[in-house]
Image: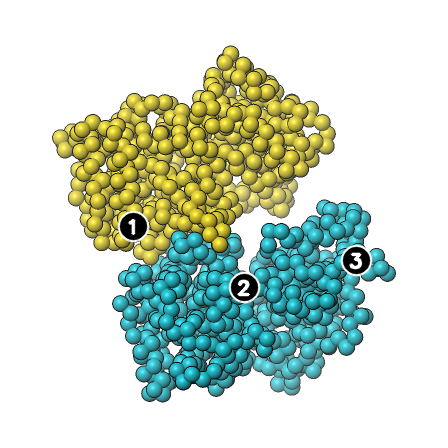
Chain colours: A cyan, B yellow
Amino acid sequence: MQIEQVDAFIIPSTDPHISEYTPERWKMREWISGFTGSAGTVVVTKDKAGLWTDSRYFLQAEEQLKDSGIDLYKAGLPETPTLPDWIASELSAGDCVGIDAEVYAASEAKSLIEFFSGKGLNVHTGFAPYKSLWKNRPANPANPAFVLPKSFTGKSCRDKIKEVLAETKKNQADMTILASLDAIAWLFNIRGNDVEYNPVCLSYALVSEKETVLFIAPEALTHEVSGYLQQEGVAVAGYEIFGEYICGIPPETKVLIDPSKINYALYTILSKTCIIKEVTVHPVDSLKSIKNATEIAGIRNAMQKDGVAMVKFLIDLEKTLKNNETITELDVEEKLRAYRSKQAFYVGESFHTIAAFGAHGAIVHYEATSGSNVPVLRNGILLIDSGAQYFDGTTDITRTISTGQVSETVKRNYTHVLKGHIQLALAVFPAKTVGMQLDILARQFLWKAGQNFLHGTGHGIGCFLNVHEGPQSIRMNYNPVPLEPGMITSNEPGLYLAGEYGIRIESTLLTVKAKTTDFGDFYAFETLTLCPIDTGLIDAALLSPEEINWLNAYHQEVYSRLSPLLSMEEDGWLKEQTKPVS
Amino acid sequence: MQIEQVDAFIIPSTDPHISEYTPERWKMREWISGFTGSAGTVVVTKDKAGLWTDSRYFLQAEEQLKDSGIDLYKAGLPETPTLPDWIASELSAGDCVGIDAEVYAASEAKSLIEFFSGKGLNVHTGFAPYKSLWKNRPANPANPAFVLPKSFTGKSCRDKIKEVLAETKKNQADMTILASLDAIAWLFNIRGNDVEYNPVCLSYALVSEKETVLFIAPEALTHEVSGYLQQEGVAVAGYEIFGEYICGIPPETKVLIDPSKINYALYTILSKTCIIKEVTVHPVDSLKSIKNATEIAGIRNAMQKDGVAMVKFLIDLEKTLKNNETITELDVEEKLRAYRSKQAFYVGESFHTIAAFGAHGAIVHYEATSGSNVPVLRNGILLIDSGAQYFDGTTDITRTISTGQVSETVKRNYTHVLKGHIQLALAVFPAKTVGMQLDILARQFLWKAGQNFLHGTGHGIGCFLNVHEGPQSIRMNYNPVPLEPGMITSNEPGLYLAGEYGIRIESTLLTVKAKTTDFGDFYAFETLTLCPIDTGLIDAALLSPEEINWLNAYHQEVYSRLSPLLSMEEDGWLKEQTKPVS
């Protein structure tokens, strides 16, 4: 920092692809601080260092930062300054803030630079001292890619490229550039294993009338994948030469990008000679979000298998508890993984399972560790949020179950969450409706009780791709992307009472056409997830007739779809769990 | 146009204050086209002329444009080009579009100029040929202003100016400029009579540390008002010299403006020498929207009086129909006006009454004319949307009533609208919630039936000021302004079946604090409007117990607040109308 005259250095948690999950090589924040949480940003000044992270990691960060000399800044608390504000208050006009443009989304870097400029601070955007300081820094992964056949994707790579090119032209651009790993995997119908949970390959891509190029490590390309790409008209180049390659794009080329999905280093190169056409949602992300008939059939299969695994697990859990055998949160993770892994086309988990008993359930993104692990007792609430990657689909399901008698208050709270879940599942809405308009359906009963949950109600889910994808969402915040037929979105209201328990009920929704009238097109949701909802936690007196009908019809569907795949004993259990509520 | 080399001239419907209702002087669009609807824009090219207006005026425009040589462009239909697109397609690169900067909001002018520049067209922003061509153009009005005492406003002008100055500084500005007539009326606690329905004075204002100046015609200032303004520390200057005055603002002065509330001519003057600080909501509009205790007490009184007038009218209507006497839509307007005018502090109507029988009810902004006027028959649906200005408050109420037997379908539709009205009235929501999040509460039952209404669910309402005010709204569109305690907003879901009938149920909501919990502050609504809802149109089987409770409690409140002000006979009628539904 002294040599480069940098007075404050920011180290965020992402990578050159602005990924949610990053390869080991890009865990600089973990390297410098020892803090391993999924979210957190470190700032180093000449005499101070701080880590900003959110409430789910306060305890963990406090422990991991002990004796590190790094102070914990609890983001979101009223007394905590935001990271940029803190930097502005620590530095003086004329000082310099260092960031590594390679790990900042262009949109974020631009607003940060604007903010610091307004405070009279300079920004050094090429500051990445870990390049030389980090001994034994892991190399970029280059695991073998593989082709996902058309029987799963429903559309050839060649056809997808044509559509992307048409959209690129519609946006008055000659070319588009992709850095999001899931966008690239979708476009080329390839998958990989370069990061945890997301079945993607480290890569970049470029699509123009003249050429379509996939930038990927040669080691990742099997003979089969190389042949396939050639056949689809895709040229291949090395991952490492991408930056160089785009330097050579002819001047004045109009390049379409989503500035929130491309890093600022690439943006800077492009903006030197090209005309940048910015979009807030990249056409690939729009196209990817609308699942085709093959993908929807696949996800239905995946849901059935996932439901079978969940039911087998729930029966196992019930037996274990009945027999007074010990089962811990980590055992739950392990058992769930085992049941899922027996299903056809199983690849792995789609995210780290949250198995949270009692008070742990109130920690929204709890992950059991050997230190935190507790046994599941016979008198509480167990929240299990888990999912899997199958070749034919990605699942994400949360069920909250009671392991014994619960109080009326617990039942009321659970029923409020369930009512919200059902009301969202029952929504009918005109074309062009965005998630923010529907969000209250899931929250209204909690709000009336003076309660709320501070995460989104719904996120997009990929098809054998990232478990969190855009562009749509259902949240309290505004997102202008409407919910369209073919989109797959989670429905996951919850309630978290610190020190007591957490409740979340999550299924996956498919947007479908409902009807067309004089008032236009109306859409609705179909719940894809197949797994019983714990009726032992319900206060049926609080449900409306419409809600009871939904619950009973849902359970009937769960039973009829899963029953053929269960043993007689399992079938009996499921029949009992799905019997009508009145 | 030839002399000034203008190839297309746009004539909109607003005035230098970007008002909804304009003085006669600014009805250029009406002058040039003969079309008198409240919304419409004319474009004149060398060989064509067109009027763009929306569906509520298609019929009227067709009639009024007959033989005018002006073509009707039905805005909103898929086949109709937007006005800027049409101009771009008619002109060639290098051609010039003329607009009068004085009657364009700065924000709108800027986006129009950007659009046309993108098409290679020039924009002449000072083109206002009606200045010389319009013979006998009416002068600007200069009716006497009057002071609204603190017993109605609850806060002195001096204190309001202090608050505005504090907000101006908070936005790093030295000065702010106001052009919105209702904002100025609120700030100075004066009212006037220069435009229809809105009790405002034609004026501009400037607030800085050094001075507060009201620019108003000398004829408008009575001795009383002059003395009052002097006492409050307000300097006065002529309305006409405002442009000149702001030319003299010292260079580099930081001026706070809302570019959607100030015309482009003023904006251009300011931007030459001053530093413009733009806000999307002007502090005066924010402050004005939060009603103080005095204003709320006033509006409660106004609601009681308005309810009495409505009840007397409804009894009169019922009798008239029972006696087989004729009563037309225009008679309804007249009778309503008469009953309201007998109430204390009555000033006038707050907008043109919509009395729409049968199929007329499906025309959202129907105004009966001698040509369209029909008698109210004893077998249909009558929609009445009306309101008044009282010194102590502004009202806006819609009731839809049956004048005979109605079908089950009508009842179902009416009950769906009512359920939405009730669900919105029952909403509880956390601080920071915006109208778009609540809007679905009012629409959900219609959406499930494949129906909708294409106007907003709620607009802000002033206190003895404009019946439509911002900054909050409850709509399908995003508006980032949260609903805060003290705001007054309408609740007006509807349903319009072309050629059949229209339904709308509108009351006024006050946002109030509901509770504070571990999850923060929660707000709710209190319905201020006091007038029975026609239970003869309700299918009670479709109402939830919660909805029935609301309706009965509302009717009990209506009865207990209005009964003391009614004759025995009227009281009997109201008792019957408000008896519990089960």
Which residue sits at x=34%, y=71%?
A: A535
| Residue extending farthest top | B223
Which residue sits at x=31%, y=65%?
A: A540
Q: Nearer the viewer, residue B533 or B522?
A: B522
Mark 2 → mark 3, Cα distance in angstroms: 40 Å
Residue position for label 1:
B547
| Residue B239 visible from this viewpoint | no
Q: Across the whole image, how many numbered discs are drawn on residues?
A: 3
| Residue B466 visible from this viewpoint | yes
The mark that comes first in sequence, 2 or 3, is: 3
Which quarter of the picture shows residue B492?
top left
Q: Secondary structure at mark 3?
A: loop
Q: Is residue A26 left or right of residue B333?
A: right
Q: Nearer the viewer, residue B493 or A207?
A: B493
Residue position for label 3:
A47
Query: Quadrant location of the C terminus of chain A?
Result: bottom left
Instruction: Return the mark for residue B449.
Output: none
Where residue B557 sits in the image (x, y, percent)?
A: 29, 38
Note whether A513 is above or below B433 in the view shown: below
Q: Is residue A552 left or right of residue A140?
A: left
Residue position for label 2:
A470
Q: Is residue B209 left or right of residue B391?
A: right
| Residue extending farthest right | A3
In the rendered structure, the residue with mark 1 lies on which chain?
Answer: B
Q: Secondary structure at mark 1?
A: helix
Where residue B177 sits in the image (x, y, percent)?
A: 60, 30
Asked if marks 3 and 1 fall on the same chain, the answer is no
Marks 2 and 3 close (CB-CB < 8 Å): no
In the rendered structure, the residue with mark 2 lies on which chain?
Answer: A
| Amino acid of disc 2 | Gly
Mark 3 Cα-neighbour bin, 10 Å: few <14, some 14–19, many ≥20: few
